[in-house]
Structures are given as C-alpha cells and as structure tokens.
Amino acid sequence: MTLEHIALWTENLERLKEFYQMYFGGIPNKLYHNPNTGFKSYFLSFYSGARLEIMQKEGIPENLNDRKTNQHLGLIHLAFGVGTKEEVDVKAAELKKAGFEILRGPRTTGDGYYEFETLDPDGNRIEVTFKD
C-alpha cells in the first residue's frame, strides 16, 4: 500500500502551487475548477510518486492552530527526503535566502535524521530530511 496523496486548504492556490513547484519539484496537473461549488484544486506530483492536493474554496475557516511554536493533534508536517546531507544544507540555504524562516536545523536528530524545519507560505510545517 502507498500513501496516495495529502490535501491542504489554502487561500492562495497559485502562490502555494508555485512554492511546491519551485522548491520541491512538484509537477502540477491542470487546474480543476467546479463552478457550481467554487472549488478549485491542483494535484502536484513528486518524484517518489506521492502527490499533494492543494485546494481553495470560499468559506473555509482559517486554521486556528499555532503551527509554528505549539503543536496540536493532527497533521503537523510534510517531510521531503533528499539524497545527501549537503542537499539538506543547500535547500535550507536556498529557502532562507528566499525569505523563509528556518525554524530548527539543519541538525542531526536523536533517531539519526539530518534535517531542518521551515514553513510554507501558508504556515504549514515542512521538514527536509536525509537518513543514511
């Protein structure tokens, strides 16, 4: 069995699509739009086969969780794996230079991952990891 996709609501579909395209190599499908409901979405496909669905629709309430400093039950982060420690460092530097805050790392965790944490433009927590 595989994890087919994860879905995120957003208020700015194009901005989030461009972020995952530019920094994580996501390949978007054609915009889906249901004019009857106002629902719009893209599926972004990644090299591993996993997909991320980003969705937009009027009336979806704001997420009240503080995803930056306090963690709550439910989905807390998306993790992207790379092939070397150097790739982790390069991606952290690239995102920092582009104005994205690096929350922690790069560092080696207690379970042996080399990683850093950041936030996407909507405040969703992202990890970039490498494991020998």
Image (tube, rainbow, N blue to C red):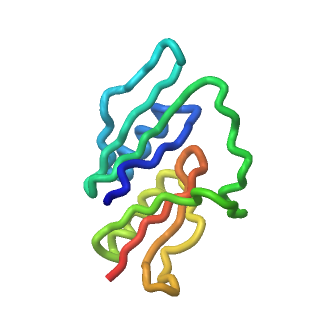
In the picture, which quadrant includes the C terminus? Answer: bottom left
Name the spot of residue 57 as percent of width and height, x first. 57, 26
In the rendered image, the vertical position of residue 17 relative to residue 82, given as above or below: above
> How many marks do you count on the picture?
0
Q: Quadrant of residue 114?
A: bottom left
Q: Quadrant of the N terminus?
A: bottom left
Question: In percent of the image, x 36 and y 66: which residue is there?
Answer: 81
The residue lying toward the viewer, choosing from 33 and 104, is 33
* Residue appearing at x 52%, y 43% in the figure: 8
Q: Is residue 120 above or below residue 9?
A: below
Q: Is residue 5 left or right of residue 99?
A: left
Q: Nearer the viewer, residue 1 or 10?
A: 1
| Rendering coords of residue 43 (x, y %) | 37, 38
Relative to 90, 97 lies left or right: right
Q: Is residue 29 above or below residue 103?
A: above
Residue at image location 55% in from the left, 38% down from the top? 9
Q: Position of residue 90 (x, y in %)?
A: 37, 66
Q: Which quarter of the picture shows residue 77?
A: bottom right
Q: Residue furthest top?
A: 36
- Could you tell me which residue is drawn at 62 percent across and 57 percent down? 74
